[in-house]
Image (tube, rainbow, N blue to C red):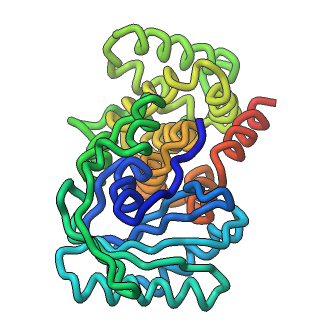
Amino acid sequence: MANPKVTSHAGLIAAIPALLGFTPTDSVAFIAIAADNRVAFAARIDIKGVMQATRTVVAAAATNQITTIVPVAITADQITGEAVAAVAAEVLITNGITVPTQLWTEAITAGSRWTAPETGESGTLPDPQATEAAAHRVLAGRSMDRDRHTIADEIAPTGSPVAAPAPRRLDTDPAAAVSAVAAIARRHATGSVLSDDDAATIGIALQDTAVRDTVIGMLATDARHAITAVCIATARRTDGPARSDAAAVYAMGMYIDGDGTRALIAAEAAKAADPLNTLADLLLEALSIAAPPSMMRHVAEAAAE
């Protein structure tokens, strides 16, 4: 399905929640526009520290051969918002990016005010749920959440963590461990509750590089959704390296699905649980330059070889 086309300032702003997967506040959103006037990708940064953060957007544009970006400041304070949008635009232009307009909105809700400070244009937003981008997201079977915290809660630890210490070596050969993970994923996908033993089995197995790589390879198959579902459940039930590896595999699956926000939040959770997680490092680097999901699918396919 083609990415949504840019037809108006108000429509572009209203599409941001569907493009990101949540409704941002106190943020700057960057909408990268391809040559056919369709959205290539969207990124979000906190409204503070905009100059440094905008440089990461420039790197992402270079990776995707994008030369046109629209910065949108989202904050209740119009004066601050318009000033921040101008700073972001200046950084982009200085780095060779075309900025056709810079925008401000007080919030991304139906009826919220927006302005294009340089031209004096202004108006109110349409319903974000009624945009072309929102329709694309629904048809793709992906949710649009209230805010980033709602998504972060999905992978937050729940209850006392299940013990899943890193083994000196697996009790079984890697192939048997992969089979065990796949069997648990299939049961979980059909409604079986993830038991403590199941969470421990997956948490231990994924700490073996050979097992983890094979499971990553399954993300490029029809088993992806079952694997991601059981991995996020495991990440919530474990801690340390076990949580980290499960969260990283889940993040990879979300990246392949095109859900960059969930991929980023899960990769950050993986890194927090184990700062030495190299898969989390790979994902965070790829996300920082907006590497396309197809690249992560190729990584998954290569991991299975």
Place of residue 180 in the rendered image (x, y in percent of width and height, measured from the top left): 56, 15
State whether residue 204 is above or below residue 85.
above
Tell me the quarter of the picture where residue 252 sits: top right
Instruction: Please state, as top left, top right, bottom left or bottom right, where the C terminus lies in the image.
Output: top right
- Confirm whether residue 245 shows in the render: no
Place of residue 111 in the rendered image (x, y in percent of width and height, measured from the top left): 17, 59
Q: Nearer the viewer, residue 45 or 263?
A: 45
- Residue at 18% x, 81% y: name it: 77
State whether residue 58 is above or below residue 175.
below
Instruction: Please state, as top left, top right, bottom left or bottom right, where the N terminus lies in the image.
Output: top right
The single residue placed furthest to the right in the displayed view is 305
- Confirm whether residue 11 shows in the render: yes
State whether residue 152 is above or below residue 212.
below
Q: Nearer the viewer, residue 113 or 88?
A: 113
Place of residue 303 in the rendered image (x, y in percent of width and height, measured from the top left): 74, 36
Place of residue 299 in the rendered image (x, y in percent of width and height, measured from the top left): 73, 42
- Residue at 59% x, 87% y: name it: 93
- Residue at 48% x, 63% y: name it: 43
- Residue at 36% x, 79% y: name it: 116
Q: Is residue 51 left or right of residue 117?
A: right
Q: Is residue 240 left or right of residue 90?
A: left
State whether residue 27 is above or below residue 265.
below
Q: Is residue 153 left or right of residue 99?
A: left
> How many discs mark residues in the rendered view?
0
